[in-house]
Amino acid sequence: MQILFHAPDANPAPWLAELQAALPQAQLRVWQEGDTAPADFAVVWKPPAAMLQGRTDLKGIFNLGAGVDAILQLGDALPAGVPIVRLDDAGMGVQMAEYVSHAVLRYFRKFDQLDAQQRAGKWRFVKAHEKENFSVGILGLGVLGSRIAAALAPFGFPLHGWSRTQKTADGMTCHAGADALPGFLAASRVVVCVLPLTADTAGILNRANLSVMPAGGYLINVARGAHLVEEDLLALVQAGHIAGATLDVFRQEPLPPDHPFWQEPRITITPHIAAVTLRADSVRQIAAKINRLQQGQDVPGVVERARGY
Ligand code: NDP
Ligand code: OXD
């Protein structure tokens, strides 16, 4: 079994060693420009078109992340009929739960204000927001969105969720489809975006939609930078309708030094670290799926190309 590897931001050596240990029968190689020798599987992050074009010999392409926007933008360069398999949680769910819980609680308990008071040497009582009016809405109720909802549930915030197909979940009001978006937004004091980036969801965090949120709303975007129209958020924060935001993803990454977000204290910036790809968990998951595919069995996490996730 031949496996191609390509992950430009990672050191390939430990990946190859761990994949080899998990799949002793495999022969692994880092893909190089011009390599068209046969292969059975590819393990990739942001692959170039030349790596995958015409490779109908592949039995599966494993994406080293949950989001598949970067690979799907290769369009017709992707070999038809070859399953593209994304990471299903693989240790990202708990990281997302930690990140979003932290951001929600920080805003709810006004820790920014408390930090500023400490820096100024002030001892002053600060009341949390009122919980019954502090509803949290999650855009995207898939693998990561449902893990975030489960982490927030014990705090007792009214919870809302929005997805393409209707869900039911104890303790959460579930909204589905484009027509239900305004009702979801109007009901969500805090909006957490954990949607895949698709033609339908690009730019969804725009002025019109963010304006539907209650005054004093707060945005947490852990999905993709292109979900957010950045100048619209800035205008709404500066106008006071949106109280602030915690953003992990941006249209341009790294965020350019002259980007106005850096100068806006109500916007908290993190460098796309909400949930990182964990090597051991990912290797375990990919090896198990390769073994299943080799035996002709189905695997979870196969991307529906037409729907974009
Ligand atoms: P899933 O595919 O499991 O879940 C996607 C959810 O979004 C589903 O509930 C789906 O609805 C919903 N959805 C998709 N399109 C629409 C639409 N048009 N309208 C309404 N709902 C829609 O993805 P994951 O939870 O695993 O990951 C989500 C995203 O998180 C990734 O695509 C990636 O961009 C981002 N991510 C960011 C990371 C970071 O560090 N910042 C790390 C990992 C992921 P339905 O259930 O009905 O299909
Ligand atoms: C992912 C990411 O999609 O790291 O997994 O953003």
Image (cartoon, rainbow, N blue to C red):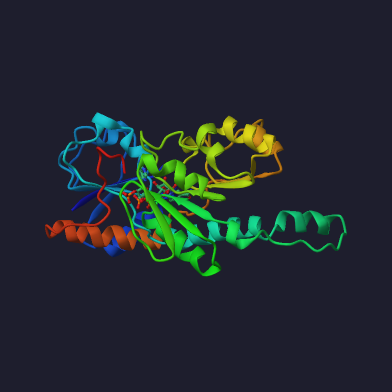
Quarter assignment of residue 16 = bottom left
* Viewer-proximal residue among 242 and 304: 242
Please report the residue visible at 64 percent of the width from the left and 32 percent of the height from the top: 235
**Quadrant of the rendered image containing residue 214:** top right
Q: Residue farthest to the bottom?
A: 154
Could you tell me residue 204's position as x and y percent?
45, 36
Q: Is residue 227 left or right of residue 308?
A: right
Residue 141: % across, % down: 39, 54
Query: At 49% across and 52% down in the image, what residue appears?
Result: 137
Query: Between 309 and 233, which is closer to the camera in this rendering?
Result: 233
Tally of marks: 0
Instruction: Report x, y in % for residue 19.
Output: 31, 58
Residue sitting nearer the eye, 198 or 214:
214
Q: In screen coordinates, is 219 left or right of 122?
A: left
Task: State whether residue 48 appears in this view.
Answer: yes
The answer to which of 56 and 163 lies nearer the viewer is 163
Name the residue rendered at 66%, 30% in the picture.
Answer: 258
Query: Could you say where residue 28 lies in the image, as x and y percent from the top left?
Result: 27, 51
**Residue under the image location 51 percent in, 70 percent down:** 154
Is residue 65 in sight in this rendering? Answer: no
Against 94, is 265 above or below? Answer: above
